[in-house]
Amino acid sequence: MTHQDTGVGWPEEHHPAKPEPSPEPSPQPEPLSEPSAEPVEWDVDAAGDAAGDAEPALEKAAPAPHRQRRISVAGAAIGLLLVLLGFAFVVQLRSRASDEQQLSSARPEDLVRILSDLDARKDRLSQEISQLQTTQQQLAAGSQGRQAALDAAAKRARDLGILAGTLPAQGPGIQVQFLPGGQGLKSAVILDAVQELRDAGAEALELDGGNGTTVRIVASSWFVDAGGGGLEVDGQLLTGQYALTAIGDPQTMRTALNIPGGVVDRVHNAGGNVIVNEPGTVRVTALHQAGTPHYARPAG
Amino acid sequence: MFAVLALVVGVVLGAIFEPSVPLALQPYLPIAVVAALDAVFGGIRAKLDGIFDDKQFVVSFVSNVLVAALIVFLGDKLGVGSQLSTGVVVVLGVRIFGNVAGIRRRLFRA
């Protein structure tokens, strides 16, 4: 075993090869006289160990041109091989470093194992994907439903706010100006006008007084003749010329005011005048302060 | 010194060019490298023993590489490529250990 490992690939020959100088006579024992210091040191050791007394003599005896040729041929071959070895070594290291190269150099059974691993992982991930998608759909549906409910509630709140007089409104409508006659306007006339307009489909109403006070007319509004000839509406005093602004169908409201025995007739009879304007879009900006009901509660 | 220089030159070349191993050579390159390493260690040991020979080194280097590659090639063809390359690596590893043991005995006398 030991003598086999001694040489590289020539286990048997080295014992006879050493003493026999036959094929190439000159540099057989130490062919490469390298210029480095280290091998020489070890050569000294080797010389002391094994019978190496003849080696330096042989080397010196070698003719110079012959040695030169040996180095040029065999040394070049050895150098080339070692360059190749280093090259291949580094290339192999590099190729192992990258993952794809590792895969492409893997054996079929390894590839099959890797593939089945990946398949199992893919199955798990697809399950996770479908679960997450279901959750996402549920959440989206929930949020959509909530958004729709919110929108509907907001719209309802806007509609109710306009009806209850807590939100400003604008739209097609008319402006009715009351020019009082000598005896002024009674609250009953204004109330009649408001009722007629409501009957004609007015959705938002406000009453402007000549003194700059504006009152939103809502379902609970009340009208009382004030002491000094003015008009008290919902606790606020209005004087001077009154103007009603109503949002609704202009034609219907104008007709409703002009019916025989209606508001216009009565004002005319009292010596006053009524001017109905249709400015197109009117704005009702006065607000009614809605209080919380004390007794009524939502039922059902 | 000259051999170490050549080895370094090869390493530097490989590091500079960074070639990718052709697909056909990929199963053989690692085995070939191990076989060449075995030859190099054998050569070092022979050198220390004072029995180094240029021609034998070159021939053994080349034949080691070729035989290792041939064995792996045959193994691949027979469907036992992985087992045979494992066997080749084991055998070459044993030889490398033996050679290193020889070098160690020569250097440290232990």
Image (tube, rainbow, N blue to C red):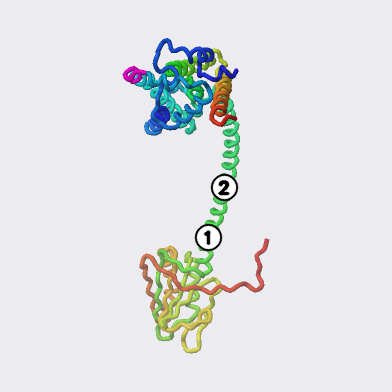
The residue located at (31%, 18%) in the rendering is A65
B62 and A114: which one is in front?
B62
Nearest to the observer: residue A133 or residue B37 = B37
Tell me the kind of residue under disc 1: Ala
Secondary structure at numbered mark 1? helix
Chain under numbered label 1? A
* The one of B75 and A49 positioned closer to us in this rendering: A49
Picture residue at 48% right of the left edge, 28% below the top: A44
Looking at marks 1 and 2 on the same chain, the residue that comes earlier in the sequence is marked by: 2
Q: Label 2 is placed on what type of residue?
A: Ala
State which region is magenta: A62-68
Q: Hey, which residue is sitting farthest left in the picture? A: A65
Q: At which x and y percent is residue A100?
A: 48, 30
Image: A253 above or below A272: above
Residue at x 39%, y 16% (from the top left corner)? A26
Quadrant placement of the C terminus of chain A: bottom right
Image coords of residue B39 (percent x, y): 49, 21
* Mark 2 surroundings: few (<14), some (14-19) or many (≥20) residues within 10 A: few
Placement of the N terminus of chain A among the 4 image quadrants: top right
Counting from the top left corner in percent of width and height, residue B72 is at 52, 17
Left or right of residue A72, residue A108 in this image: right
Residue underneath mark 2 = A141
Q: Are marks 1 and 2 on the same chain?
A: yes
Q: Which residue is mark 1?
A: A154
Tell me the distance, in whole angstroms, between the alpha carbons under discs 1 and 2.
20 Å
Confirm or deny contact between disc 1 and disc 2 (CB under 8 A): no
